[in-house]
Image (cartoon, rainbow, N blue to C red):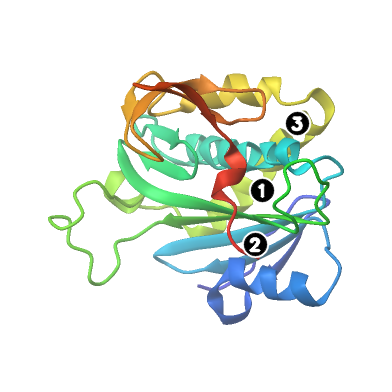
Amino acid sequence: MNGAPSFPPLLHGVQAAGGNPFASALAELASAEAEPGRVHYALRDDKLSAALVLAPEMPLADAMGALLAVQLGLSDALGTLAPPEVAVQIGWPDRLLVNGGLCGRFRVAAATDDPEAEPDWLLVGMEIDILPAADFDAGLTPDSTTLFGEGCADLTAIDLIEAWSRHMMGWLHTFMSEGFAPLHAAWTGKCADLGKDVTLPEAGRFLGLDEKAGMILRRTTGDAIIPLTTILEPR
């Protein structure tokens, strides 16, 4: 894919070493201080991968709200680029669904796994399937899809990352200036499984989010809150 994406102010893009933005960003963070606003990306015809470095000035449990900003930014970007009949939803905690099919995933890592500590850095990654892979077999993965398969024939990785970065920055600004409440309201409106029975991360009924985006889960043994920090990946 030719060309480099344009990013809004406060963001700086860099092509990911080895084509893996999340690993590229983690390797850089391990050897240098965090550079907030740095977007590692890999653009392919069939897939968009990106990882955003943040340096939140708040405890980790609160900073995890940035994941919702990234997710909402992507949802809004697809809302502007995809045909109007395409339904974009988010599955807690890390799934992008298009017309009900799994079309992308999100990842998070941080400099600490202590929810009360302020992390030196927070890394949020995403990967979206644009075209089917060469070995894709819809019969083997009936719950998965691609943007192309859902009617987004003209959408490119550059289109998507540019639109995502603009919308995501708007949500990050809202998060920093107004707190979690606006993101909570917008996210729950896009959630695919709110009020439904779920099996992941465990069986129960998904009742909603708590004030730090944790899952409120009704189980046969009683209600529980599953913190969003449980999805943190090893550093």
The residue under label 2 is 5
Q: Is residue 48 left or right of residue 34?
A: left
* Number of other residues with Cα within 10 Å of mark 3, as a class: few under 14, some 14 to 19, many 20 or more: many
Could you tell me which residue is drawn at 49 percent across and 45 percent down?
94
- Under circle 3, the secondary element is helix
Observer able to see residue 24: yes
Could you tell me which residue is drawn at 17 percent across and 56 percent down?
138
Circle 1 or circle 2, nearest the eye = 1
Circle 3 or circle 2, nearest the eye = 3
Say which of 163 and 139 sits in front: 139
Q: CA distance from mark 3 to mark 2?
A: 25 Å
Label 1 with label 2: CB-CB less than 8 Å: yes
Say which of 64 and 150 sits in front: 64
Q: Earlier in the sequence, mark 1 or mark 2?
A: 2
Say which of 92 and 192 sits in front: 92
Residue 188, position as x, y percentages in the image: 52, 22
- Under circle 1, the secondary element is helix
Q: Amino acid at mark 2?
A: Pro
Q: Is residue 226 left or right of residue 229?
A: left
The residue under label 1 is 165
* Number of other residues with Cα within 10 Å of mark 1, as a class: few under 14, some 14 to 19, many 20 or more: many
* Number of other residues with Cα within 10 Å of mark 2, as a class: few under 14, some 14 to 19, many 20 or more: some
The residue under label 3 is 175
